[in-house]
Amino acid sequence: MKAELISIGDEILIGQVVNTNSAWLGEKLTGIGIEVTRNIVIADSREEILQTLRESGNRAELVIITGGIGPTRDDVTKSTLAEYFGSRMGHNEEAMERIRNLLKGRVDLNELNVGQAMLPDNCRPIPNFNGTASGMWFEKEGTQYISLPGVPYEMKTMMSDYILPALRETYDLPAIVHRTVLVQGIPESHLAIMLREFEETLPAGMRLAYLPSPGRVRLRLGSSGKDRKTVEKIVDRQIERMKTFIPQEQVYGKDWEELEVLVGRLLKEKNASLALAESCTGGSIAQMITSVPGSSAYFLGSVIAYSNPVKVEMLGVDPASIEKHGAVSREVVEQMAEGVKKRFGADYSIATSGIAGPDGGTPEKPVGTTWIAVASAHSTESAVYRLGDHRGRNIQKAALTGLNMLRNLIISGK
């Protein structure tokens, strides 16, 4: 079964609202075996809606529309749907009762609220217990059309409680299985070369997708079939085979696992603590660590040692090392890591020092040059990275790289 998603709203087109609905819908529909082939955003205008409905209806067996069914004058979706499906508008008492119960004791009913109970006579109403706009389910020439409010928590509840169960019960849907491997520190193009032989020998119907972001790449492997358990076993076998083509120290997780969550789990398992000394990352690693609930159990604190005097006075870096080697150097970053670990009494530490850009680079140390060190009670390890010329991406890459270096240090037991 192929589906297309239509999001209606000028606010999405002009960038005032981020369209999170489509991402959520894509994940949920794929999870029950429906293939999403298009994601379309259009203005809330009669002409755009009619044209898009015709085009999507010719291509897909399921069309899900979100947005444009509010009570105000600029929401024309409901009237346009009635036109497209040859409907007459009529008062729906069940919808009216839900609206009364929702607004009781909060606001007085007005004519716009009452108008939300007017629905096309040939649709299947979808109850909305979190808002005043009912959903509408139509069928035309073999295609199912479902119109839902654009408010995310309203739409998600209606999908989860009503629509997804109905689709599963009505259609014999295949099992679509996706597995994801998370890789840090290897560019997409390099991974593609590493995995060339693997891709060429994949079973028929199995697809590998590269989903890059600064500092990491998600490798998504997917297949489909009649029996979910059988498909899962086939995909899982290929996932394990794929990992053998990639340096294991760069593979840090699976599916939606975040690196900061994995590092926190390792620290908790060892009953160990962490401190940070950040220069070029400016607190980004600390922000990632503290975004994880329960991180107070292992995270002690951070020094944002952006200036050289702070490196010396707060972390005990030798001024002669800065004078001789520069702040962006192995000598300095290792002293930062050891100094912050000692100052906080931590079991592990991460330190960063680099040239984030866009200026400050030299021929010897161009923009993007970043030294990162990790330290434990037994060892201090450091490495230099050439991260690029974009400040924001450099900071993000350095933060992720530092966390992955710590992950590997903890796993190694050094």
Image (cartoon, rainbow, N blue to C red):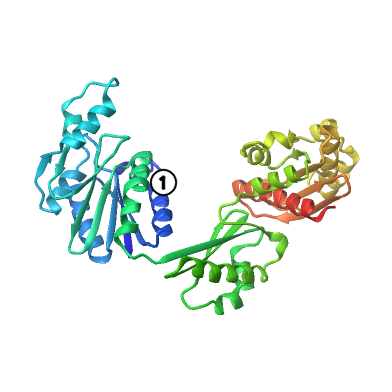
Q: Residue at x 73, y 37 (%)?
A: 298
State the image coordinates of residue 319 (x, y, percent, origin top left): 88, 37
State the image coordinates of residue 305 (x, y, percent, origin top left): 76, 35
Res 388 → quadrant: bottom right
Q: Local crowd at mark 1 within 10 Å, few (<14), some, or many (≥20)? A: few
Q: Residue at x 31, y 50 (%)?
A: 163
Answer above or below: position of 66 versus 233: above
- The residue nearer to you, when weighing 95 against 61, is 95
The kind of residue tagged 1 is Thr
State the image coordinates of residue 369 (x, y, percent, origin top left): 72, 52
Q: How many marks?
A: 1
**Quarter of the figure with the N terminus:** bottom left
Q: Is residue 119 left or right of residue 20?
A: left
Disc 1 marks which residue?
20
- Is residue 332 something that shows in the picture? yes
Q: The residue tagged with tag 1: helix, strand or loop? A: loop
- The residue nearer to you, when weighing 181 against 189, is 181
Answer above or below: position of 41 versus 344: below
Q: Residue at x 70, y 48 (%)?
A: 403
- The residue nearer to you, when weighing 303 against 414, is 414
- Is residue 357 something that shows in the picture? no
State the image coordinates of residue 269 (x, y, percent, origin top left): 74, 45
Res 273 → quadrant: top right
